Amino acid sequence: MGKINVEKLDPNPEFDLYLYLKVSGAAKVEQAQCNLCLQHWDAFKEYLKGYRFSAPGARRGVVLFFLEPVVEGMVEEAWARSPSEGFALHNLAVSMVMGAAAQCVPEIEAGACAPLPTPDRDLKRRLERLGLVWNDAGSVSVQYAVMTHDPYAGGCAMCHLRASCPKSEV
């Protein structure tokens, strides 16, 4: 990517019950669980961050959406209280970052996948400036994050995880 511009985004996804059900693998959700999710949505959203990285003047780039580590703590506390509550809030956090990414790159929703780019040295440095560390296995140092191409690019053939992904068609 070379020199990189960083644009701070203002993600504001709405709670999407369909996405939540898809993430959780459930066919339905009880009202109490739905209420729990709605109660935590705004609290989680305070910690939702979004950035777009691109070369100067380039139309193509990479977007990153993540929840700050405080959300991981909130989910862990929920697991300690009740496994079902922990599972619900874990799925809520995943739904939030996926929803934010789909809001920015709508093709994600259609394909239910956000191909992960392999960051170059410059992008890794930009991630480090945000307090994040890239792991060559294909993740950053926070539990809830989505990084993908913007605009949408290529699916499985463009994904860093293509060799290990169960959905891979490569």
Image (cartoon, rainbow, N blue to C red):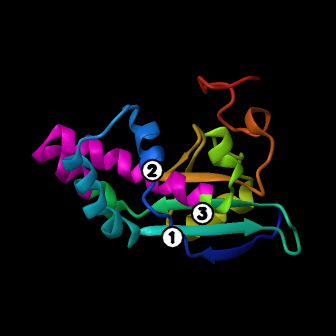
Residue most toward the left? 81
Residue most toward the right? 57
Using residue 135 as the reference point, say whether residue 115 is left or right of it.
right
Q: Nearer the viewer, residue 50 or 142?
A: 50
Using residue 23 as the reference point, say whether residue 29 is left or right of it.
left
The numbered mark, 2 or 3, whose residue comes first in the sequence reads: 2
Which residues lie in the magenta part? Answer: 74-102
When asked about the image quadrant of residue 137, the answer is: top right
When asked about the image quadrant of residue 103, the answer is: bottom right
Q: Provide the secondary structure element on which disc 1 rests.
A: loop
Q: Nearer the viewer, residue 12 or 4?
A: 12
Label 2, label 1: how many angstroms apart (C-alpha)?
13 Å
Mark 3 vs mark 1: give the one in front. Answer: 1
Q: Which residue does the image show at 36% across and 51% down from the upper left?
A: 92
In this view of the protein, can residue 67 be seen by the observer? yes
Return the residue at label 2. 95
The numbered mark, 3 or 1, whose residue comes first in the sequence reads: 1
Q: Which residue does the image show at 74% across and 53% down from the upper left?
A: 120
Return the residue at label 1. 12
Look at the numbered discs 3 and 1 and tell me whether their residues touch, using CB distance below 8 Å: no
Q: Position of residue 91 (x, y in %)?
A: 37, 45
Label 3, label 1: how many angstroms apart (C-alpha)?
21 Å
* Number of marks in picture: 3
Q: Residues within 10 Å of mark 1 (few under 14, many from 20)?
A: some
The answer to whether 52 is drawn above or below residue 135 in the figure is: below
Q: Amino acid at mark 1?
A: Asn
